[in-house]
Image (cartoon, rainbow, N blue to C red):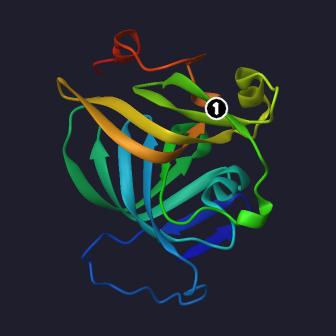
Amino acid sequence: MIGSIGTRLRLVLRQPGAGRTSAVVEGADLPEIEFVAYSTSERLSGRIRLDSARLTDMLNTHHEFVLVDALAERLPDGGSMIVPEILLWRHELALVRVGGPRGDRSLRVRTKTDRIIMRSGRYTVSGRLHSSAGQDPLAALRSRDPMVPLTDAAIHYRVGADIVEEPAGTLVVNRDLVDWVREGELDARSLDLPRN
């Protein structure tokens, strides 16, 4: 389900209940996960089969993503459709919700967590940033690869006049698209979301 050419990653998504099987059986023993990407104007979703890397590593390795058979929801107006194929550049990809298993336990390092709030275009995100003991969390954010994971995360955005809140568990944020970031808890000031 995943093939790459240079820095372009082709992700073939499967919609729940679609009942289709992929002709690609390579890596069939690797987990299939929910994939939800938030671009600057759409929410794209489906299920993909991971390759051997963590999703965060895959997102940092590639600059272009071709999503095949994605459910696309227009934001903020609403409305959805299945898109046969869409090309996303990493600079258009604001957030990716991570599902499925965590990475290899033996590769984990001990970290501290700090609550942060950030705005990325139409989205407000809250979550926990993991960093080394004694490291300033905002400096840690700046020193990471562009796609940075947050745990215990939530996303807020508008659909029409309503503010939607989506608990995200683990969320990968494109640091290069962040408008502002601060330490602390979510408050009403953070939810002053754009209407278009």
Please state which of residues 88 and 154 is positioned toward the viewer in this rendering: 154
- Does residue 93 appear to the left or right of 13 in the view shown? right
Q: Residue at x 66, y 59 (%)?
A: 58
Which residue is under mark 1? 175
Q: Position of residue 182 (x, y in %)?
A: 58, 16
Residue ID at (71%, 29%): 141
In the displayed structure, does residue 116 sit left or right of residue 147?
Answer: left
For residue 161, above or below residue 105: above
The residue at the point 48 percent across, 29 percent down is 126
Position of the C terminus, as image quadrant, is top left
The residue nearer to you, when weighing 39 against 168, is 168
Q: Amino acid at mark 1?
A: Arg
Whole-percent x and y of residue 143? Answer: 80, 31
The residue lying toward the viewer, choosing from 73 and 16, is 16
Residue at (77, 46) in percent of width and height: 110
Q: Is residue 107 left or right of residue 85?
A: right
Q: Residue 169: percent from the left, percent from the top?
A: 46, 47
Instruction: Establish if 11 lies above or below 41.
Output: below
